[in-house]
Amino acid sequence: MKTVKIPQILLPKNADMTAWAVNACDQFTSDYKYWEEVEKLTRGKLSTFNMIFPEIYLKDNAPARIAAANAAMEKYLKEGVFKKVEGGFILVERSTESGVRTGIVLAIDLEDYSFEKGAKTPVRSTEATILERIPPRVEIRKNAPVELPHIMLLYNDPDDSVLKTAERGEVLYDFDLNMNGGHIVGTYIKNAQKVTDALYALVADKEDKFLFAVGDGNHSLATAKTCWENLKPTLSAAERETHPARFALVEAVNIYDKALNFEPIHRLVKISDPAKFKKGLSLKGKSAAYLAIGGKSEKIPFPENVPEGIRSLDEYIKSYLAENGGEVDYIHGDKELLDFTKEGGAGIILPAIKKGDFFDLISKGGNLPRKTFSMGEGNEKRYYIEAKLIK
């Protein structure tokens, strides 16, 4: 296999790291106060905030914001803000309310990734990619000289064999993240090739060489793939082998990590007649979900195959709304959903996918339905810290 690449990683030489690192651009997309506070915290300082485009501002003079982000990248490169970390990976230990989540910053070969449904590549998307969300991201990336990843990939290692292989070197950073993001430590991994071999060993004896599933940043990785495919025709065969845009920087996390919480994303159907919605709902199966109306819930049948159950539910919701009007929202937390239904509408509290079933479900059934699962709360998502040249 050639999926994993030992990258040249860029880190700031002399920066206030708490100001440098900011949360993923696709978080808090309705919370202007969050991003206004981030802007205040980072104002006048070296920060990844200056090089990203928070999605809350996608309709706010996007061309100017994209140009400013690209200019900041060029400025940081020209002024020597970055130092190079070469020949190894970075072990990331992130402390949040959920515990200490451990990941490995590495690069993957985009030739071994596909977001197409049913793809059998070593790196696969987990949820359906919304194609119309890619072009705006391509505009952001196509002229960018560096990438800053918030992509998190999952690997299937119940024995934790990969992390047991890693040899620690120098501590590269150790600081508190802003905006209640917890604490983070990054340590150089000296034996990157042995760690790579341990990753490959996870699928060595399997017919399906499914190594990584995209946990977070699905559309960002799809954008990197799209930009690479757009660039390839302009390159010679030799250039294609080594061009930096071919390789995407990611954080790989064991799906069995104890601090990695897999949570369902519930459906809130905002309608005027929840009793009518309930009457038409006819899910079947040996498992269970809960229908919430008026702040109270009752058990309803649900398929044991959770993704198939969600597909059936989403189809019913779509047809019901088309006929009767209303809208659907996606809610984290049982209590939150119950509280919303006190104000009207109907909610469906969904079961979580078991970690042990996750890779098998994708291997057999392809992409999961949209909004099937979430990994932690917004403040636990990956912060931008490391960068990599893509030009």
Image (spheres, rainbow, N blue to C red):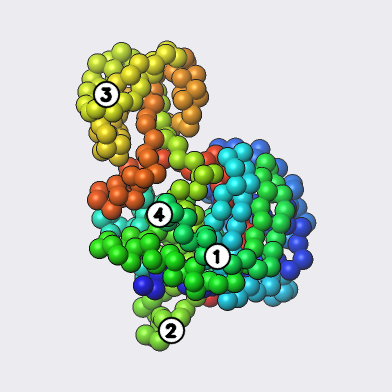
Place of residue 28 in the rendered image (x, y in percent of width and height, measured from the top left):
57, 41
Amino acid type of the residue tagged 4 in the rendering: Asn
Q: Residue beneath label 2, please? A: 239
Disc 1/disc 3 C-alpha distance (Å): 45 Å
- Where disc 3 sits, the SS reads strand
> Label 3 neighbourhood size at 10 Å, few (<14), some (14-19), many (20+)?
some
- Where disc 4 sits, the SS reads loop
Disc 2/disc 1 C-alpha distance (Å): 32 Å
Q: Residue beneath label 4, please? A: 156
Disc 3/disc 2 C-alpha distance (Å): 55 Å
Q: Residue beneath label 1, please? A: 166
Q: Residue at x 70, y 60 (%)?
A: 173
Q: Residue at x 49, y 68 (%)?
A: 195
- Where disc 1 sits, the SS reads loop
N-terminal of the pair, mark 4 or mark 2, is 4
N-terminal of the pair, mark 1 or mark 4, is 4
N-terminal of the pair, mark 2 or mark 1, is 1
Place of residue 128 in the rendered image (x, y in percent of width and height, measured from the top left):
34, 49
Q: Judge whether 256 appears above or below 319 on screen.
A: below
Disc 4/disc 2 C-alpha distance (Å): 33 Å
Q: Which mark is residue 301?
A: 3
> Pointer 1 and pointer 3: residues touching (CB < 8 Å)?
no
Place of residue 386 in the rendered image (x, y in percent of width and height, measured from the top left):
61, 63
